[in-house]
Image: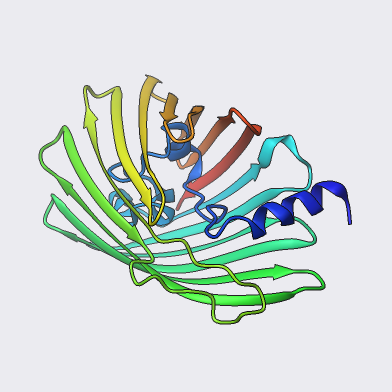
Amino acid sequence: MKKQTLIFLMLFFNITNIYAQNVSGPKLTAMGNTGAAVNDIWSIEANIAGITNLSSPTIALNYINYHFNNEISTQALVFILPLNKNYLGLSIQRYGITEYNEIKAGFAFAKKFGTNLSIAIKGNYHQIKINNYGTTTGFSADVGVMYNLNKQLTFGLYINNPAHQKYTTNTVKNNIPSTISMGASYHASNKILIAASINKQFDNKFDVGFGIDYKLLEIISLRGGLTMKPFKQYVGIGLNHKKFNVDLAIENDPNLGYSPQIALAYAF
């Protein structure tokens, strides 16, 4: 086993809960992971209620390379299907390396009530596999709500795994993370979106995030963000042309370095 693989597994066994499966896409990542009150296709992995702004079936692919390491990466796929004021969503992602990987798959249902309120729920299947050690699985549910106070101000709240579900076997002992996030977004103009969120993993400290999205041109958006605990910096860019969207983001961790990601989306 390679040295970096051994270090990776040692880190895993010393952390009760892990965030590897919480992939919120380049837009929300670049805005400091402020997905509580921001609409995006990747809201299916943040505040699920945020998928209710989509007007047509949309599919997206995401790839993350952690700290420019060729072996540690995440691949993700999401699909959203609007049905009048009801929305169905599918998501699947894989994180890890050859010797260790996680898989998370989910099915979401969101509903829009009038023009201001959206409520959503999502069921998840989790799997962890470590070569020559074992495999464990588990199930969890997420819930989310988003409310538009007016055309400028939106509030959001979502909870991942509120029932504190755990993996079903003792082969690999680990909990499914339980987190709560709340936040707000403000459209300062038709070009500027500002967002903030407070996130807490149960039994851990609060984290605060801030982000901004600036539409430089009709087809180009520039993004940036910060999180406090630990202090991280994020930048990104979004390109959209007709039915295609390309989003890029880079996360800067002061201890681990840079993690770039890219997502491609197509609206049918």
Q: In this view, does 23 lie to the left or right of 7?
A: left
Count every numbered label the image shows and give the total: 0
Q: Residue farthest to the right?
A: 1
The picture places residue 212, in percent across and down from the top left corner, at 36, 26
The picture places residue 106, in percent across and down from the top left corner, at 47, 68
Q: Residue farthest to the top?
A: 216
Q: Quadrant of the rendered structure where residue 215 is?
A: top left
Q: Is residue 242 above or below residue 36?
A: above
Q: Can residue 12 be seen in this view?
A: yes
The residue depicted at 52 percent of the width and 58 percent of the height is: 17
Q: In this view, does 166 lie to the left or right of 209?
A: right
Q: In this view, does 86 lie above or below 243?
A: below
The picture places residue 182, in percent across and down from the top left corner, at 27, 46
The residue depicted at 40 percent of the width and 61 percent of the height is: 178
Viewer-closest of 163 and 49:
163
Viewer-closest of 178 and 96:
178
The residue depicted at 29 percent of the width and 49 percent of the height is: 53
The picture places residue 68, in percent across and down from the top left corner, at 73, 35
Q: Quadrant of the rendered structure where residue 220 is?
A: top left
Q: In the rendered image, which quarter contains the N terminus? A: bottom right
